[in-house]
Amino acid sequence: MNAYLRMTGLALAMSTVAWGGVSRAAEVPKSSDVKQSGTLAVANTLDYAPFEYLDADGKQTGIIIELAGEVAKLVDAKLDVQRTPFPSMIPGLAAGRFKIAWETFSATPERLKQVDFVMFLKAGLAVSTSPDKKAIFSGDTPLCGKRIGVSAGSASDFLVDKLSKECTDKGQAAIEKSVFNSSTDIVQAVLSDRVDARMDDATASSYFEVTSKGQLVVLPTLYEVAPLGMAIAKNDKETADMMVAALAELFKNGTYKTILDKYGMGAYAIKEPYFVGTMDALRAE
């Protein structure tokens, strides 16, 4: 009897393993290209930390590189990161030179004429300040009356003007804007108390918070939030389906959040990956 129970238990365990394998394969379908080549090829610039860059030893690393490596494992393929200049990516997809350009693209009507997207992140503009000044940025209008540094001609430059008008319309003090030629100059201005804070790309700001070991801290409010995604050749459904399914597994098993948190990007997680073939498919996060 005991032997029978042991054998029955073993059979059930083996059945469970086999069933799990079938389930996973169904959840993460391989594209024809991956099936034939055994390789997950991804175009990437390798020069935009913290998403993709070469470390001190010349090793490819960053959020996108780590996520791509995990996707490659799920589809049982070797990862091949093909270094490609950013301006060449969408034309390269349209010309069929590669299937996936994994960067942090925003979807636009012009881009969607040539490619589709799989969204996996969100970003926007954020304000960062020194730890000792964090407490002064409170209430519904935390920037009113503050000295804010921005890069000339950037989205932050224009947004601060808009927010400053909202402050004065509400009878509060205007934002005192200072314009700089580089992000490095703005950081130094905050550290030397020439401005109270800087407004810049949210992801870059969060990465600086981590690498600077807290010299600046990012405030919780995100402005002009928009989803970001990788680009897929237009109407390449099987590649898009593969990437959505693989990312969904990484979201589900916690790998996605672990990788974002490692680089200080947890605030920019979205609820689930999704396909965008038209502007109507974009979601508010």
Image: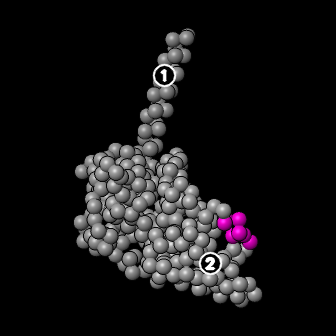
Is 146 magenta? The answer is no
In this view, 21 is above or below 203: above
Residue 10, disc: 1
Residue nearer the viewer, 63 or 97: 63
Location of residue 123 in the rendering, given as x and y in whole percent from the top left corner = 52, 67
Location of residue 156 in the rendering, given as x and y in whole percent from the top left corner: 53, 78
Q: Residue furthest front?
A: 192
Give the image location of residue 133, x and y in percent: 66, 66
Q: Residue at x 44, y 75 (%)?
A: 182
Q: At 28% from the left edge and 72% from the top edge, which residue is drawn?
A: 88
Residue 283, quarter of the rendered image = bottom right
Viewed as shown, does residue 23 lie left or right of 56? Answer: right
Cα distance in 3D space between marks 2 and 1: 69 Å
Residue 276, located in which quarter of the rendered image?
A: bottom left
Q: Which residues are magenta?
A: 133-139
Q: Which mark is residue 272?
A: none
Residue that label 2 marks: 147
| Residue 56 visible in the displayed image | yes
Who's the residue at 43% across and 41% down the image?
A: 22
Which amino acid is tagged 1?
A: Leu
Disc 2 secondary structure class: strand
Residue at point 52% right, 46% down?
Answer: 253
Q: Give the residue type that dot 2 points to.
A: Arg
